[in-house]
Image (cartoon, rainbow, N blue to C red):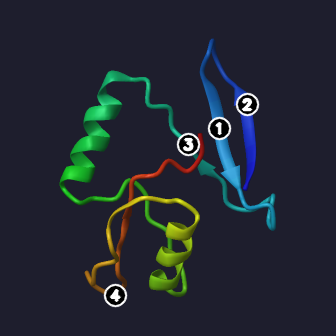
Amino acid sequence: MEKHDVPVVGADRWLTVVSPEDPGGTELLLEPAAHPAAKTYRDTLVQDGIPLAQFAVEDVHAEYERLRGLGVRFTREPLEGGPSPAPSSTTPAAT
């Protein structure tokens, strides 16, 4: 994963990550969590079982196991919920 870190105003930064295999590809914006509403928002989504972000992969079960092996903590295993299963992660994308 490659990081793009751009200072914005004061201590705030515009931080995105992108695949090193496709540096010009889709970037994932990592939102700051300093705003007081951010914790309530995230906690409520987790409590309700709603993911903060979703990504499409060919084999969700294989990807779930691969990410677990890399240290990602999930709130649950993939569930059948329509055309594709949906696990939920509690591990930040980057620190």
**What is the x, y in percent for residue 89?**
40, 59
Which residue does the numbered mark 3 point to in the structure image? 30
Q: CA distance from mark 3 to mark 1?
A: 6 Å
Q: Point out the image quarter for the N terminus.
A: bottom right
Which residue does the numbered mark 4 point to in the structure image? 83
Q: Are marks 1 and 2 in contact (CB under 8 Å)?
A: yes
Q: Residues within 10 Å of mark 4 (few under 14, many from 20)?
A: few
**Is 93 in front, or is 17?**
93
Q: Is residue 43 toward the left or the right of residue 33 in the image?
A: left
Which residue does the numbered mark 1 point to in the structure image? 15
**Is 82 in front, or is 60?**
60
Q: Earlier in the sequence, mark 2 or mark 4?
A: 2
Indicate the amino acid at tag 1.
Answer: Leu
**What is the x, y in percent for residue 77?**
33, 74
**Kind of element beneath mark 4:** loop
**Kind of element beneath mark 2:** strand
**What is the x, y in percent for residue 72?**
49, 59
Q: Residues within 10 Å of mark 2 (few under 14, many from 20)?
A: few
**Kind of element beneath mark 3:** loop
Q: Are marks 1 and 4 in contact (CB under 8 Å)?
A: no
Give the residue drawn at x 64%, y 27%.
13
Q: CA distance from mark 1 to mark 4?
A: 32 Å
Find residue 75 and report its image quarter: bottom left
Q: Point out the image quarter for the C terminus.
A: top right
Q: Earlier in the sequence, mark 1 or mark 2?
A: 2
Q: Earlier in the sequence, mark 1 or mark 4?
A: 1
Q: Earlier in the sequence, mark 3 or mark 2?
A: 2
Q: Are marks 3 and 1 in contact (CB under 8 Å)?
A: yes
Indicate the amino acid at tag 4.
Answer: Pro
Which residue does the numbered mark 2 point to in the structure image? 6
Give the residue drawn at x 79%, y 65%.
22
Find residue 10 and report its image quarter: top right
